[in-house]
Every structure is written in structure tokens, then in C-alpha cells.
Amino acid sequence: MRAIVTRVTRASVTVDGVVVGKIEEPGLLVLLGVTHSDGPQEVVNMARKLHEIRALRDEESCATTGAPLLVVSQFTLYGSTKKGRRPSWTEAARPEQAEPLVDGVVAALRERGARVATGVFGAMMSVESVNDGPFTLLVEV
């Protein structure tokens, strides 16, 4: 499982002209990708890491500040561009495997007390964000 984590001052996800998820204060925008070998342990580990990663200002985390997270599924994080000009998606988990794991990360974050907004799995989404820093990390478990 991997995530691109960006520190933002605000972010939102729109589907069909409707805002379906947003954070309106400093927090983290998380683009979350799942691969074939991911399972329940990766869900727990990723939720912990996202909640506790010290990526906010003053080396704080969402766990210590209560800052929100906006989690958006992103199968393209497992795209490969090693050969040719067309990305290969063979390392990305199929939707029927990935969706419950993405939902599991969101649920595990909420169980930890995190405030979490989301996109819509599998939808064509417009993601807007205002980067803070900019500060962006690749997080893998």
C-alpha cells in the first residue's frame, strides 16, 4: 500500500459538480493506492502511519493536533512507466480488492479519532488543494 501525502491548508473532491469531501483547515491530502499483496495488516499500518506521521508544521501530526485528512483512492499510484509510453496498471489491485482496503484505512483512521473526509471510490473526481510548503511525501507500508 502506498500513499502520496501532501500538507495542505485546504482541499476538496468534486464528483459530477458536487463537493463530496473537503477539509477547510490545515491537514493532509492523502492519495491512497492499493496493490495485490495488500491486506488487513497494511490497512492497520497505513492508518497508524497517516495519523501519526509528523508532516504538519512544527513536526506535528494529525494525531497530536486533530488536523483533518482527505483520503482519495488513487489506483494510478501503482502505474508503471518503465516500458514504452503507456503506463501499465498490472500492479494496481482490482477494484473489488482495493475498495474494501481503502474503506478499511478510512475506518481505522476514524477509530483512532481522526477526522476524515473522502472522495468516491472509482468515480471521476476533481481534486483541488492548496499545498502548504509545499510538503509532499511518499508513504509506503
Image (spheres, rainbow, N blue to C red):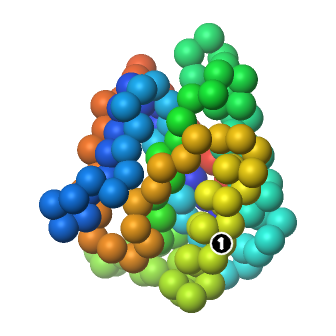
Q: Secondary structure at mark 1?
A: helix
Image quarter in which the N terminus is found = bottom right
Residue 111: where, in percent of width, then height? 75, 51
Residue at image location 35% in from the left, 39% down from the top: 11
- Residue 70 can be seen, yes or no: yes
Residue 73: where, in percent of width, then height? 47, 64
In the picture, measured across the screen, residue 79 lies left or right of residue 65, that is left
Query: 139 and 105: which one is in front?
Result: 105
Q: Label 1 belongs to which residue?
A: 101
Query: 26 and 80: which one is in front?
Result: 26
Q: Amino acid at mark 1?
A: Leu
39 vs 51: above or below: below
Residue at image location 39% in from the left, 76% down from the top: 122
Residue 113: where, in percent of width, then height? 71, 41
Q: Residue furthest left?
A: 17
In the picture, measured across the screen, residue 94 lies left or right of residue 101, that is left
Picture quadrant where residue 112 is located? top right
Count of numbered labels shown in the rendering: 1
Query: 3 and 96: which one is in front?
Result: 96
Label 1 Cα neighbours within 10 Å, binned few <14 / some 14-19 / many ≥20:
many
34 vs 94: above or below: above
Residue 103: where, in percent of width, then height? 60, 68
In the picture, measured across the screen, residue 3 lies left or right of residue 107, that is left
